[in-house]
Image (cartoon, rainbow, N blue to C red):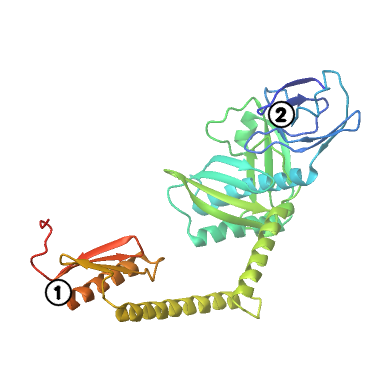
């Protein structure tokens, strides 16, 4: 243990250890999670990893469990959550591939405007003035998946900033780079026949060894975050498999609800459309029955005096304000036809009130 400091919450603390296998948050990628095992066998979850200053790495841990640690204390084991790290790697490499695909589909004026990479998904903001069409989204997905299936190596190396520029490596606008930078490359060969075969960017994050670990890839959302800036979210690798499996399970549940025997998307859609048709027919029938009930309801008032009749009627369509208002007005008109000399006040469901009279002596200025 090198040092400790107060964490963001009262029950948390930052801990610095050496050597440290954890990757800190940076470049849009979230920090590693994992476990520390102390000398007495106590296991402490590492909740996050950050870089408080250029050469330092801090681990967020439980304050109480690490209360006895002081500079010089020994940590028996520092273990990174391997599954979370690999998933974050897949999403980081996929972010580079998506960026290259967007530039190929929309034009080289498109530039990354921010990103977030986690084990669960990736998010990429980019400069573009309008929403993507369904065809553009399909092309981006196809490009990334084809490059992933080609099993192209993902390599990294350090170069001088001038050599990086000469290699046409993408550099993010507004970022500050030193004299030596790390370049992450995905470069397929011409014989692969890929529509997208190259992605070269400056990056300090973690990545997979091969594009095959990005497959399958799926764009799950696209939208606007600001004027001239769009955002896509996507899943890749095992996270994408989980995404597809959850959708398949949901499709099966919908099929069961729709009483579909054949478990295929077309059959489920047809079943849902049949349910919608039945629902529409049922609503029409219910409205017809409500109209019949309203028409047959007695217009006798519950109270009358001084030329005023009060009627209380139930709200037969509490979930449909438009239908309820129409039914109340229709009832009031029928009551006025039956007793035209009186003012009829109709209270529907204890909330809606309508006043109607056919007699010219009843008007807004009459006390």
Say which residue appears at 69% left-offset and 55% top-offset.
Answer: 148
**Residue position for label 1:** 340
Viewer-proximal residue among 279 and 151: 279
Viewer-proximal residue among 1 and 166: 1
> Residue 246 location in percent, x, y?
67, 61
Q: Residue furthest right?
A: 40
Can residue 309 be seen here? The reply is: no
Say which residue appears at 69% left-offset and 37% top-offset.
Answer: 205
| Badge 1 or badge 2: first in the primary sequence | 2
> Residue 175 location in percent, x, y?
56, 30
Q: Which mark is residue 11?
A: 2
| Quarter of the rendering occupied by the N terminus | top right
Task: Give the SS element for disc 1.
Answer: loop
Viewer-proximal residue among 42 and 289: 289
Task: Give the SS element for disc 2.
Answer: loop
Q: Residue furthest front?
A: 305
Query: For the residue carrying disc 2, how many other residues have a C-alpha within 10 Å: few (<14), some (14-19), or many (20+)?
Result: few
> Residue 306 location in percent, x, y?
15, 64
């Amino acid at each position: 243990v090198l040092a400790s400091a107060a964490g963001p919450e009262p029950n948390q603390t930052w801990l610095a250890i050496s050597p440290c296998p954890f990757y800190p948050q940076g470049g849009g990628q979230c920090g590693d999670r994992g476990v520390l095992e102390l000398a007495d066998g106590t296991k402490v979850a590492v909740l996050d990893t950050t870089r408080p200053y250029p050469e330092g790495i801090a681990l967020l841990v439980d304050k109480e469990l690490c209360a006895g640690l002081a500079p010089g204390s020994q940590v028996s084991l520092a273990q990174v959550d391997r599954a979370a790290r690999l998933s974050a790697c897949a999403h980081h490499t996929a972010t580079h591939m998506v960026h290259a695909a967007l530039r190929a589909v929309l034009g080289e004026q498109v530039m990354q405007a921010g990103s977030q990479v986690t084990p669960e998904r990736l998010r990429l903001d980019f400069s573009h003035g309008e929403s993507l069409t369904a065809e553009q989204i399909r092309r981006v997905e196809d490009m990334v998946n084809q490059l992933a299936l080609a099993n192209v190596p993902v390599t990294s190396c350090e170069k001088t900033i001038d050599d990086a520029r000469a290699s046409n490596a993408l550099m993010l606008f507004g970022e500050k780079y030193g004299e030596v930078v790390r370049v992450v490359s995905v470069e397929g060969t011409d014989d692969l026949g890929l529509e997208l075969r190259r992605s070269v960017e400056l990056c300090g994050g973690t990545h997979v060894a091969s594009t095959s670990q990005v497959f399958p890839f799926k764009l799950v959302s696209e939208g606007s975050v600001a004027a001239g800036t769009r955002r896509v979210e996507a899943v890749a690798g095992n996270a994408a498999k989980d995404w597809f499996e959850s959708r398949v399970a949901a499709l099966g549940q919908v099929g069961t609800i729709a009483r579909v025997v054949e478990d295929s998307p077309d059959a489920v859609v047809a079943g849902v459309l049949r349910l919608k048709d039945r629902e529409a027919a049922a609503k029409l029938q219910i409205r017809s029955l409500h109209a019949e009930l309203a028409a047959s309801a007695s217009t006798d008032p519950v109270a009358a005096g001084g030329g005023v009749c009060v009627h209380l009627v139930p709200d037969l369509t509490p979930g449909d304000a438009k239908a309820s208002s129409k039914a109340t007005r229709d009832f009031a008109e029928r009551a006025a036809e039956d007793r035209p000399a009186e003012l009829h006040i109709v209270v529907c469901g204890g909330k809606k009130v309508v006043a109607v009279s056919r007699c010219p002596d009843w008007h807004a200025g009459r006390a």
